[in-house]
Image (tube, rainbow, N blue to C red):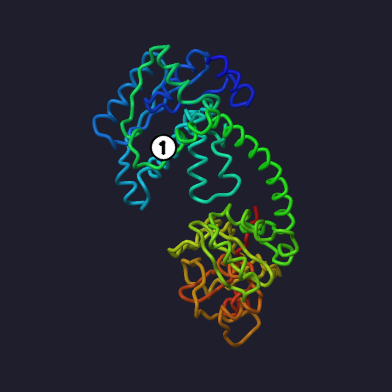
Amino acid sequence: MINRFTTFIKENSLFSPRDKVLLAVSGGVDSMVMLHLFEKAGFYFSVIHCNFQLRGADSDADEALVRQRAEELGCTFFVRRFETTEYARIKGISIEMAARELRYQWFEEVRQKQGFSWIATAHHQDDLLETFFINLSRKTGIRGLTGIREKSGAVIRPMLFTNRTEIETCARQNTLEFREDATNNELIFQRNFIRHRILPGFDELNPSFRANLAETIRNLRRVEEVYQATVEKQISRISSAAGENTEISVAALLRLPFPKQILFELLSRYGFNAAVISLVFDNLETEAGKQYFSKTHRVVTDRGKLIVTRRPEEEEAVFYIDQDDLEIFEPLNLSLEWVESENFRLVRDPGVACLDAARLEFPLSIRRWKSGEYFQPLGMEGFKKLSDFFIDEKLSLPEKENTWIVYSGDKIVWIVGRRLDNRFKVTPSTRKVLMISVKNG
């Protein structure tokens, strides 16, 4: 097995022999065999273990076994105990999902802090087939049917060359000690039901079923590569970056041969599910300002385009400018300069506010606008609603939300980068000028 192991790593360019690899070892047969193979191959590695405290003394025994083996091999051992049940309750997710989140968040934290190149998990061919059926049962696209990848970000899976039977044989032949999780035999878990009921049934129909399905998954990956190349080309034709947002041309989208599928591929990257994406597509030409949400992002319709933006923060953020500040960095990078009136030259730049210092009340504040607010636009005697000003300026909803306002007390001083309030402009009677400039980059 060691030769197949090293060949698989080389053929799939999983890592270099010089790389530091963090081995995720649970104490089960799969990860203990992986640890054995890394040791025999002479690679540079350390061991990391999660104690999710879900099985009482058994969880502690798993930790003790992995610790003992790491000490025997003389390698660094990282371990953390998690309050998994409480985490799942707070987050409103399953225990399995909670354990997954905790595991990979901590793995990545250790990887970065300790300078490891890769995190290795012990997923093998049977895991690949089980994942195929799980995704199939949940309704999935072609990517979901291609299963677990050999490499995903900083995570590598060097055991995908083999299956559970071969792993157990290797453990017996090398008298490797491991822990058996009793829950692996409980049919109440979806993966275990597939492992003990579904796959054995197919084995009875065709002894070559597992090998054939593994080859089918490899074929699907090749098809997916062609599909994704086409999708990326189409997405580049209909979308573009606009600051931190993504804009999608509705007209360009509808000219594509399969517009709904391309929209799905694009919006699913931002966490939108198929039902919401279908709703977006059915209402592409609705009035501007219609919104659709995922957990992290939002799509807004806006005059012939869709704008994808991060969901705005729920809590209002307020920042302050003190009289002795020369520069601030949050929420914008602004520089401040005090100028005597005799040395002042008016700057006609929307990114620069020239203010009569005597009219200002410090500290100034900076925050987002609120509905119903008024200001006196520069050059006007009357007042105007901010919302009406934004309509006149033809600002999209995300642009409105990303506009910052400078206030003196409760009075608007400057709509940053757009318009000064007439009450704070420089006049012939001004003695000192405060110049606030937006610094780019």
| Image position of 280 (left or right of 26) | right
**Rendering coords of residue 431 (x, y %):** 59, 73
Q: 387 or 412, which is in the foreground?
A: 387
| Residue at screen point 59% across, 77% down | 421
Instruction: Count how many numbered circles sit on residues in the image.
Output: 1
Residue 344 visible (yes or no) = no
Label 1: how many residues lie within 10 Å, few (<14), some (14-19) or many (20+)?
few
**Rendering coords of residue 289 (x, y %):** 58, 73
| Image position of 304 (left or right of 156) | right
| Residue at screen point 58% across, 61% down | 277
Q: Amino acid at mark 1?
A: Arg
| Image position of 154 (left or right of 253) | left
Q: Secondary structure at mark 1?
A: helix
Q: 440 or 390, which is in the foreground?
A: 390
Q: 105 or 169, which is in the foreground?
A: 169
**Rendering coords of residue 192 (x, y %):** 39, 37
Residue 39 visible (yes or no) = yes
> Above or below — where is 32 with respect to 431?
above
Q: Quadrant of residue 180?
A: top left
Q: 181 or 23, which is in the foreground?
A: 181
Residue position for label 1: 197
| Residue at screen point 48% across, 67% down | 365
> Above or below — where is 289 with respect to 183?
below
**Rendering coords of residue 91 (x, y %):** 36, 51
Toward the bottom, the furthest residue is 382
Toward the left, the furthest residue is 57
